[in-house]
Image (cartoon, grey):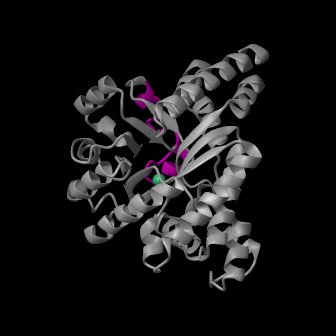
Amino acid sequence: MIQPSTAEFIRRMPKTELHLHLEGSISPRTLLELSQKNRVDLGVNDLAGVERMFRYQDFLGFLDVYRACARCLIYGEDFERVAYELAIHLADQHVRYAEVMLSPAQHMLRNMDFNEILGGVAAGFDRALKERGIICRPAFDFGRQFSLEEAHRAVELAQEGMRYGVVAFSIGGDEANYPPEPFVEVFAVARAVGLHVMAHAGEVAGASSVRGAVEMLGVDRIGHGFRVLEDSELTEFLARRGDITFDVCPTSNIRTGVVATLTAHPLRQMLDAGLPITLNSDDPSLFGTTLTAEYLLAVEHFGFSIDEICRVALQGVRGAFIPAAERERLLSDFSAEQARLRSELDL
Ligand SMILES: [Zn+2]
């Protein structure tokens, strides 16, 4: 059982979210409306049907829904709508800063115009910034199962997208069959043009995938990364370095089946090993979670103390891809607000 004052603290404390996907954040109602407006056949035609789709049984079922979400996004106004709705959903949870991944390959496949996509996303984020003060920036997450040629094209598109606020390039998708090493050149180009870089690693594949992402790709952050613990030397090395953040998404790992149960999830071990970690929702609609719910889980299931919760929230600022002055300002705002809430709630 979680203390009401602790739950209240978690709900109201300022947060960042560094690992979530735009296409996996679309609500069932919005997906239904977009599919009807754009005449995309989802195989279902009412809200109950879409909600049934969201209760997929396995990883392949999850991928089907994810691709269906991407397929329903056709016009700039669609991207604007889902970007705005996600930003408001985050602002309602006291998120002050978020980085939101798009899957460029899903849209390249359909020959979409990235000026229209990113113009729409930026307009949606801008509206939320004006209304609620939340800062959201896009990032590209390239599916590693697509070709290297397409990966290079995606980096070019990300570079062109920097004028719409794109901050980072990442690889995701089929980690088990596509190790990081072939992407060395792609990542070197991404870094050279001024993009931050990260990778989903140590989620489906083991610690060698994390090592490859760090040593070969030069990533600043790792998505998930919990299987790094299978290599104690690498874990100690990264804990000592302390400059590579692990964006952990516990509910996602249960829903996709990469971890069998919450009890088996190594979130606590990652913190105790001294790895810099953040908490994230990954695909909140598809996984039926929220960022606040992930923090509540950390207390309820993993015994995080208020000090530990505060530390994780601050790591969300330290690991963010923002200029130094913005980081310092957010760090001091977050610390002051944490102290104020702790005193108000007697924690
Ligand atoms: Zn992800």
The percent position of residue 207, horizontal first and vertical second, equals: 27, 43
Q: Is residue 217 left or right of residue 289?
A: left
Placement of 96 over or under 237, stated as above or below: below
The percent position of residue 52, horizontal first and vertical second, equals: 67, 70
**At x 70% / y 57%, what residue is drawn?**
85
Quarter of the C terminus within the rendering: top right
Quadrant position of residue 302:
top right
Quarter of the N terminus within the rendering: top right
Placement of 332 over or under 81, stated as above or below: above
Q: Is residue 241 visible?
A: yes
**At x 29% / y 38%, what residue is drawn?**
230
Give the extent of the magenta segment. 250-271
Q: Is residue 219 left or right of residue 332?
A: left
Quick check: is 262 in the magenta stretch? yes
Which residue occupies the foreground of this view, 8 or 343?
Answer: 343
Q: Is residue 211 left or right of residue 319?
A: left
Quadrant position of residue 50:
bottom right
Which residue occupies the foreground of this view, 103 or 207?
Answer: 103
Quick check: is 247 in the magenta stretch? no
**At x 77% / y 18%, what residue is drawn?**
345
Q: Is residue 256 visible?
A: no
Q: Residue at the front extreme?
A: 163
**At x 42% / y 38%, what residue is drawn?**
246
Placement of 339 over or under 71, stated as above or below: above
Which residue occupies the foreground of this view, 330 or 227?
Answer: 330
Which residue occupies the foreground of this view, 175 or 321?
Answer: 321
The percent position of residue 217, horizontal first and vertical second, equals: 26, 48
